[in-house]
Amino acid sequence: MDYSVWVTLDGKRLNIAEMTTDHFKNCIKMIKRSKFLDVMERYDTVPEPPPRYVVDYDQYKPYLNTFTKELETR
């Protein structure tokens, strides 16, 4: 997976360096929320209704480092 490109929900490919700071923060929240939900699913305690936007935490975890490094340069 190319961690220098983020693919939006509608399939748009964004170069990480061109994303806004707010978009980074929202993506970080979504990835972290996905980790929380993954753990909750193991214990059958997912909230109702479940959050709308989640991703596979293990697959998207490397983006956390990418976003953090990019935020430090701004």
Image: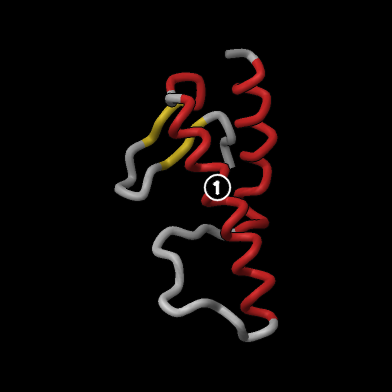
Q: Give above or below for 5 relative to 42.
A: above
| Secondary structure state at the residue bearing disc 1 | helix
Residue pictured at 63% horizontal, 13% vertical = 73
Q: How did the renderer colour the structure?
A: secondary structure
Q: Quadrant of the N terminus?
A: top right
Q: Is residue 18 left or right of residue 11?
A: right
Query: Position of 57 compared to 18: left or right?
Result: right
Q: Quadrant of residue 44?
A: bottom right
Q: Residue at x 47, y 37 (%)?
A: 6
Q: Tag count in the figure?
A: 1
Amino acid of disc 1? Lys
On screen, residue 38 versus residue 11, left or right, reads right
Residue farthest to the bottom, as pictured: 44
Give residue 3's position: percent from left, percent from top.
59, 35
Quick check: 73 above or below 49? above
In the picture, the quarter occupied by the C terminus is top right
Judged from this view, the residue extending furthest toward the top is 74
Q: Give the answer, above or below, for where 61 lies relative to 18.
A: below
Q: Residue at x 64, y 64 (%)?
A: 36
| Classed neighbour count for the residue bearing mark 1: other residues with Cα under 10 Å, few (<14), some (14–19), many (≥20) | some
Q: Position of residue 63 (x, y in %)?
A: 62, 39
Residue closest to the eye, 11 or 36: 36
Quarter holding residue 14: top left
Look at 69% across and 83% down and name the residue there.
43
Image coordinates for residue 68, horizontal then vertical, percent: 66, 29
How far from the left and from the top, in percent, is residue 24? 51, 33
Residue wearing tag 1: 29
